[in-house]
Image (spheres, rainbow, N blue to C red):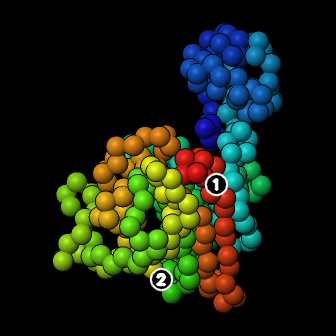
Amino acid sequence: MIHIGDFMYIAKEDSTLLTYILKYIEPNRKKAKKLLSNKAILINHKNISKFDYPIKKNDTIEIKKFWDTSICEKIHIIYEDKDIIVVNKPTNLLTISTDKEKEHTLYAMVSDYLKRKNKMSKIFIIHRLDKDTSGIIIFAKSEKIKKQYQENWNSLVKYRGYTVVIEGIPKKEEETITLFLKENKLYKVYPSKEGEKAITKYKIKQSNRYYSLLDIEILTGKKNQIRATMEYIKHPIVGDKKYGSKDKSLGRLGLHAHKLIIQNPITKQNMTFECKIPTSFLKVTK
């Protein structure tokens, strides 16, 4: 992702524009050319996009802020209004940044999308999903709205639905499982009398000899709740090495947040958001 703010440079030597960019500003040729194609370069305050434009020593080179539209096109927007934006997060993507990853996040992608429409736009995280989990996430467009959702999250959420691919077939077609979960020093959640209550309901939607597709509702929102519960009943989620799976047939974690019903804290009306189940989930469980 390219996300370049307003920067200014004074040319150190005579050169051509692309050569100078590659040497002093952006060493990646593809990204450097994108700066030019997006008209993000100003020479002596004039917009220049020719790669062979002559640069003279002491020329002023400005890099203006822009957002890579190819990134924005990858965002699946489920719903948007003046207060919130709801998106379908891809798998293998962090919701927000960490010490190791600052730029390649859903937060950055959504922020870039909104800033293309209004450079003063801001977004605020309301909730999140694990990096390897796909599905519905809501962002707020103001800190006030964020607080209204976060401070009343448990009372506002009416339904949290997930689609899961697990190894094998559970003995019961549907069941409600109550566990008390605690996190260890390795950040893995496990059943413990000292843990917090976690209630998970599942129903088998389809299955074959090797896998089952479950429709899951969580009545509590504990960390790794579904993953720990599936390991507990000895049917780990496909692709979930951390919680007992050795199966990599999906090429990803078989966990997707497909439905969310939440009350709007302002209008008091329930809002229902849904996104499609990944095709690979349906194919592997036929």
In the rendered view, tell whether residue 160 sits above or below residue 69. below
Dot 1 or dot 2, earlier in sequence: 1
The residue pinned by badge 1 equals 110
In the foreground, 101 or 25? 101
Residue farthest to the bottom, as pictured: 268
Classify mark 2: helix, strand or loop: helix
In the foreground, 2 or 73? 73
In the rendered view, tell whether residue 148 sits above or below residue 164. below
In the rendered view, tell whether residue 277 sits above or below residue 46. below
Q: Is residue 268 visible?
A: yes
- What quarter of the picture does the N terminus occupy? top right
Name the residue: 44% across, 49% down. Answer: 210
Q: Which of the two marks, 1 or 2, is nearer to us in this view?
A: 2
Coordinates of residue 118 in the picture (x, y in percent): 75, 57
In the foreground, 193 or 16? 193
Taking the image as shown, residue 267 lies to the left or right of residue 179, namely right
The residue pinned by badge 2 equals 154
Name the residue: 55% across, 47% down. Answer: 284
Distance from the alpha carbon under mark 1 to that under mark 2: 25 Å
Question: Where is residue 67, by image quadrant?
Answer: top right
Residue kind at label 1, given as amino acid type? Val
Name the residue: 68% across, 79% down. Answer: 271
Question: Where is residue 24, by image quadrant?
Answer: top right
Q: Which mark is residue 215?
A: none
